[in-house]
Image (tube, rainbow, N blue to C red):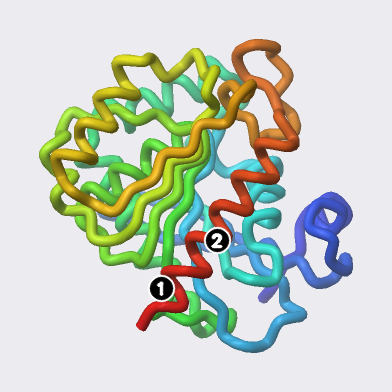
Amino acid sequence: MKKSLFPLALASLVGVAEAAVVVKPVPYEIDGEAFEGMLIYDDAVKTPRPGLLMVPNWLGVTEDSAKKAARAAGDKYVVFMADMYGKAVRPKNPDEAKAAAGKVRGDRALMRKRAQAAVAVLKAQTAEVALDTSKLGAIGFCFGGGTVLELARSGADLKGFVSFHGNLDTPNPADAKNIKAPLLVLHGADDPTVSDEQLQGFVAEMKAAKTDWQLVSYGGAVHSFTNPTANVPGRNEYHPLAAARAFKAMDDLFAEVFASP
């Protein structure tokens, strides 16, 4: 049964009728452990649409992340928001989020496994919504952006990968040779959480792998520049112009890769 959550906030954000935005909890399991993500789409659209896996920031599955997913989805995509921690773990503050994210970031095999499982859940949603499973991509924000890059390095068979203000480091740079699709990194040029060393390491990694990649740095933008609630000046701060440009860049990439045979 479809369940519309936070309808007024989501409708205001994406500019659609209140009843059109559906946010539906989707329970699933990984190795017997309970997880619960969210399926987000505009139910006014009845024709099959491409699907996007979305990995949220370190706070995980939250109302704010659902709003972000709705903005990304619009009427173009079906979005499945992954649960990277398990249903029993819902961070309530930055300290809890840091602990939960650190556990996953510290085990890249676990990170990849959970992201890959979420891709499988997205593919299985055809009974719930009109979804074109031949056109799937992945996006992520902050911790989620880094997760999406690891998903790409794992060799996931998707059409494109987009990281919004995500971490760029990996313990396995040689795995970039496994990337099968275009990769787009949307980065705040003044993001203090991504060092110059990390940035240059990523560039070297991509060049060595000879993959299809883009790095866009937005001047004046710091970490979390797409998050309207980010308000720590100079560190985590919403930048509406950079956010709008970043979402357009995402749309442009997916319009290109989803148009290909």
Instruction: Identify the secondary structure beneath mark 1.
Output: helix
Instruction: Identify the secondary structure beneath mark 2.
Output: helix
Q: Which mark is residue 194?
A: none
Report the quarter where the C terminus lies. Answer: bottom left
The vertical placement of 30 against 59, above or below, is below
Residue 108 picture quarter: top left
Q: Position of residue 64 (x, y in %)?
A: 69, 41
Q: Residue at x 20, y 56 (%)?
A: 155
Report the front residue among 119 and 194: 194
The Cα atoms of the two marked residues, 2 and 1, are separated by: 23 Å
Q: Given contact means CB atoms under 8 Å apart, are the residues at marks 2 and 1 in contact? A: no
**Residue topped by disc 2:** 252
Classify residue 243 as left or right of residue 51: right
Q: Position of residue 6 (x, y in %)?
A: 80, 53
Report the quarter where the N terminus lies. Answer: bottom right
**Residue topped by disc 1:** 123
Classify residue 92 as left or right of residue 7: left
- Mark yes or no: residue 85 visible: no
